[in-house]
């Protein structure tokens, strides 16, 4: 990510209070030393019994691991943002810019989108999403794509409220199919225009 792309999102951001006595979330790019905490955060959001984003009733196994996150950090096409509150990671999401096609809009995939169950329903997910969308707009990306696990209508509804629409196409589950608790569960593709 270039300095131009990260304007306003820095590793050394200083929190600003949004109200007297209330800490603000700090959005910044992820670093290598965040990896262990990121693994724990994502696991809590996707596989624990708490929070409305859990998939524990649909999927077993881990959602990510340290090697996958380190590979994201090393990929120049990936932007991995984290949200910090009082020094602890509270949320994260990445975008992966796809290679440009000769015809058609430039696209990026949104993923690893997680807010710790204890921090949900505070608007943090929306802030992370909009920060990523703004970085992509500045870089010339025209469409943001997400793949949402089927069987999660409340999650698809949230994405619709954020400007995404289903495109009428599904793809296979991205993880180990043996982890599925519901046979043949796939992922619905949703897109949001950025221009």
Image: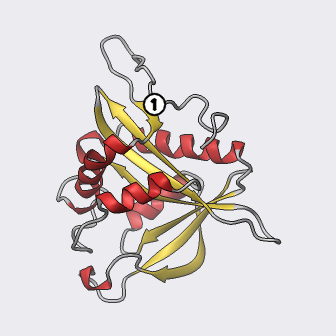
- Which of these two is toward me, 53 or 15? 15
Q: Callout 1: 10 Å neighbours few (<14), some, many (20+)?
A: some
Q: Is residue 169 above or below residue 100?
A: below
Quarter the N terminus occupies:
top right
Q: Could you say whether the residue bearing mark 1 is in a helix, strand or loop?
A: loop
Q: Is residue 151 above or below residue 146?
A: below
Spot the residue most to the left. Answer: 49
Query: Position of 158 compared to 175: left or right?
Result: right
Q: Residue at x 63, y 40 (%)?
A: 2
Query: Position of 78 compared to 40: left or right?
Result: right
Q: Position of residue 37 (x, y in %)?
A: 26, 45
Q: Residue at x 39, y 37 (%)?
A: 83
Q: Residue beneath label 1, please?
A: 11
Q: Position of residue 16 (x, y in %)?
A: 42, 17
Q: Position of residue 185 (x, y in %)?
A: 37, 83
Q: Is residue 40 above or below residue 131?
A: below
- Which of these two is toward me, 194 or 135? 135
Q: Position of residue 46 (x, y in %)?
A: 28, 60
Query: Position of 140 compared to 185: left or right?
Result: right
Q: Residue at x 53, y 32 (%)?
A: 9
Q: Residue at x 52, y 56 (%)?
A: 75
- Which of these two is toward me, 13 or 149? 13
């Amino acid at each position: 990510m270039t300095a131009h792309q990260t304007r306003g999102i820095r590793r050394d951001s200083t929190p600003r209070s949004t109200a007297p006595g209330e800490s603000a979330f700090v959005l910044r790019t992820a670093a290598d030393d965040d990896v262990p905490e990121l693994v724990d955060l994502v696991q809590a959001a996707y596989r624990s019994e708490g929070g409305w984003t859990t998939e524990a009733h649909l999927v077993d196994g881990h959602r990510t691991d340290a090697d996958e996150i380190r590979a994201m950090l090393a990929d120049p096409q990936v932007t991995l943002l984290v949200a910090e509150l009082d020094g602890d990671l509270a949320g994260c999401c990445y975008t992966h810019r796809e290679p440009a096609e000769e015809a058609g809009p430039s696209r990026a995939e949104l993923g690893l989108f997680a807010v710790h169950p204890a921090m949900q329903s505070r608007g943090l997910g929306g802030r992370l999403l909009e920060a990523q969308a703004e970085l992509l707009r500045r870089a010339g990306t025209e469409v943001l794509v997400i793949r949402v696990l089927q069987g999660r209508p409340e999650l698809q509804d949230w994405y619709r409220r954020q400007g995404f629409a289903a495109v009428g196409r599904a793809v296979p589950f991205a993880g180990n199919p043996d982890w599925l608790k519901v046979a043949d569960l796939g992922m619905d593709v949703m897109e949001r225009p950025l221009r």
